[in-house]
Image (cartoon, rainbow, N blue to C red):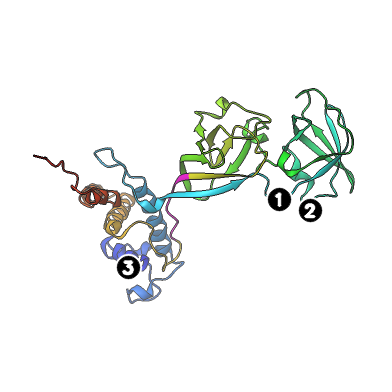
């Protein structure tokens, strides 16, 4: 069922409320539905909310209604993705004066605030950066991390020893030695994160306060899902590939020709969900209870895509008695 067909069906079954009129003319035809009208805007929003509701629906037997297209796997590379090279002109325990002219790509000074770098076997956190002149930047670094290294100048910091935090973390109340990334759009929950390079699953900490922060390790061992962000327990000191197993929400329906995200067999359930909400809107208690019951019956009687796994087995789920 297309979005246009869905709106036409909802209009026919909803009692033709005048404030929900979706057409641009007197003819109540599918091709006369007007995008931008008050009625169409309401129905599109209702369909969007209904898809999200069904994608997260828990049945009476406490099983979640599941659709394969909302479970996704993404391979994502994090860490420094281009060469970063600084020549250290001088340093003290809490300051580094560096030459940035060897940078082969354009980065603002602000990009290096909250970054981690290794120098003389010790990790340093950049708290602020000041441009003394185009060939000299001054890093104010986190003090008292280790003994002051005494290298022979000039010494070079290269990209394999440098990590730029993806996003500032000061307003999250977490250690500045962690790495914070935004979740992909519409992701609702994280099912699993694997580190390809170490071939291990990264554990999920129960809260951001329980992350065991590592300053210089650079290999994540734990993460926490904090709002719309993922916080790793260390800054990434090199490029690393991760596989994210995610559960995402359906896309909003904003266009009349947009394809619905949920599978076709559940379009009738979506109709019942929308009619239930319209009845609630109109304070029609009896209709509301009836549409809720129809919705639940429809969800019970319609098998989801994972129910088909039953038919893949050689015995169709039954034990075979061998004589």
Answer whether labels 2 and 1 touch (C-beta < 8 Å).
yes
Q: Position of residue 110 (x, y in %)?
A: 76, 44
Q: Quadrant of residue 61?
A: top left
Measured in 3D between alpha carbons, the distance from the residue under mark 1 to the one under mark 3, in whole angstroms, is 49 Å
Measured in 3D between alpha carbons, the distance from the residue under mark 2 to the one under mark 1, in whole angstroms, is 8 Å
The residue labelled by disc 2 is: 104
Q: Position of residue 89 (x, y in %)?
A: 89, 38
Q: Position of residue 242 (x, y in %)?
A: 54, 44
Q: Of tags 1 and 3, which is closer to the observer?
A: 1
**Magenta residues, as a range?**
245-253
Is residue 63 in view from this perspective? Answer: yes
The residue labelled by disc 3 is: 5
Q: Residue at x 41, y 59 (%)?
A: 42
The first of marks 2 and 3 along the sequence is 3
Q: Residues within 10 Å of mark 3 (few under 14, many from 20)?
A: some
- Quarter of the C terminus within the rendering: top left
The residue labelled by disc 1 is: 82
The first of marks 1 and 3 along the sequence is 3
Answer whether labels 1 and 3 touch (C-beta < 8 Å).
no
**For residue 120, above or below residue 50:** above
Q: Position of residue 92 (x, y in %)?
A: 86, 28
Q: Residues within 10 Å of mark 2 (few under 14, many from 20)?
A: few
- Quarter of the N terminus within the rendering: bottom left
Q: Residue at x 89, y 47 (%)?
A: 135
């Amino acid at each position: 069922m297309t979005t246009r067909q869905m709106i036409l069906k909802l209009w026919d079954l909803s009692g033709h409320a005048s404030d929900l009129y979706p057409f641009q003319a007197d003819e109540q035809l599918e091709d006369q539905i007007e995008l931008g009208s008050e009625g169409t805007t309401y129905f599109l929003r209702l369909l969007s909310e209904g898809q999200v509701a069904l994608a997260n629906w828990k049945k009476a037997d406490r099983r979640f209604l599941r659709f394969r297209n909302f479970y996704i796997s993404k391979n994502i590379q994090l860490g420094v993705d281009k060469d970063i090279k600084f020549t250290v002109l001088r340093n003290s325990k809490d300051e580094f004066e560096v030459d940035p002219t060897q940078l082969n790509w354009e980065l603002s000074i602000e990009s290096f605030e909250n970054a981690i770098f290794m120098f003389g076997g010790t990790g340093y956190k950049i708290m602020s950066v000041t441009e003394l002149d185009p060939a000299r930047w001054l890093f104010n670094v986190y003090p008292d991390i280790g003994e002051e290294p005494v290298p022979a100048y000039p010494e070079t910091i290269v990209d394999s020893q440098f990590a730029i935090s993806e996003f500032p973390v000061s307003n999250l109340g977490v250690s500045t030695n962690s790495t914070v990334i935004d979740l992909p759009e519409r992701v609702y929950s994280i099912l699993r994160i694997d580190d390809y390079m170490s071939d291990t699953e990264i554990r999920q900490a129960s809260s951001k306060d329980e992350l065991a922060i590592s300053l210089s390790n650079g290999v994540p061992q734990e993460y926490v899902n904090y709002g719309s962000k993922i916080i790793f327990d260390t800054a990434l000191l090199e490029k690393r590939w991760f596989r994210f197993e995610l559960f995402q929400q359906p896309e909003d329906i904003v266009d009349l020709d947009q394809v619905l995200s949920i599978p076709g067999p559940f379009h009738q359930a979506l109709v019942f969900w929308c009619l239930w909400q319209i009845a609630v809107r109109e304070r029609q208690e009896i209709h509301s209870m009836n549409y809720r019951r129809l919705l639940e019956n429809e969800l019970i009687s319609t098998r989801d895509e994972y129910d088909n796994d039953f038919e893949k087995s050689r015995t169709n789920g039954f034990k075979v008695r061998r004589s």
